[in-house]
Image: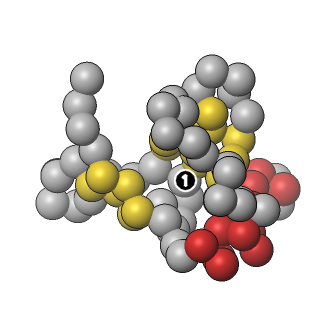
């Protein structure tokens, strides 16, 4: 297990883009994140572009910025 730091946009942006509310994630929820690692090799990720977050236990996507690329194919 590794500890990572992942950063998204602000609450209003998440609500507009993905419909997030204060109840979207709860303490103890397990998530899977796909996204780019920082260029300096640290365990940090900026998820503003090309990223996906899913609830691990049920597989539900709660953020997917790959959507626009997939729709264009």
Query: Which percent across, then down, holds residue 44?
Result: 27, 55
Disc 1 is placed on an element classified as loop
From the image, which quarter does the N terminus lie in?
top left
In which quadrant of the rendered view does residue 55 lie?
A: top right
**31 left or right of 64 in image:** left
User: Camera-side residue: 71 or 6?
Assistant: 6
Query: Which percent across, then down, holds residue 51?
Result: 54, 53
Please say if 30 is above or below 41: above
Residue 41 visible in this rendered orientation of the protein: yes
Residue 32 visible in this rendered orientation of the protein: no
Query: Which percent across, then down, holds residue 19?
Result: 78, 62
Number of marks in picture: 1
**16 left or right of 51 in image:** right
Question: For the residue carrying disc 1, how many other residues have a C-alpha within 10 Å: few (<14), some (14-19), or many (20+)?
Answer: some
Please say if 73 is above or below 4: below
**69 left or right of 48 in image:** right
**10 left or right of 15 in image:** left
Measuring 55% from the left and 58% from the top, which residue is drawn there?
A: 50
Measuring 24% from the left and 38% from the top, which residue is drawn there?
A: 3
Q: How is the image coloured?
A: secondary structure
Please say if 18 is above or below 3: below
Query: Which percent across, then down, holds residue 36?
Result: 39, 53
Which residue corresponds to mark 1?
A: 51
Measuring 65% from the left and 77% from the top, which residue is drawn there?
A: 13
Measuring 84% from the left and 56% from the top, which residue is drawn there?
A: 71
């Amino acid at each position: 297990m590794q500890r990572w730091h992942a950063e998204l946009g602000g609450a209003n942006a998440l609500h507009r883009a993905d419909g997030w509310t204060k109840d979207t994630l709860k303490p103890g929820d397990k998530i899977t994140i796909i996204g780019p690692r920082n260029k300096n090799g640290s365990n940090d990720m900026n998820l503003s572009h090309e990223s996906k977050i899913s609830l691990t236990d049920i597989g539900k996507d709660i953020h997917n910025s790959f959507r626009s690329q997939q729709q264009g194919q």
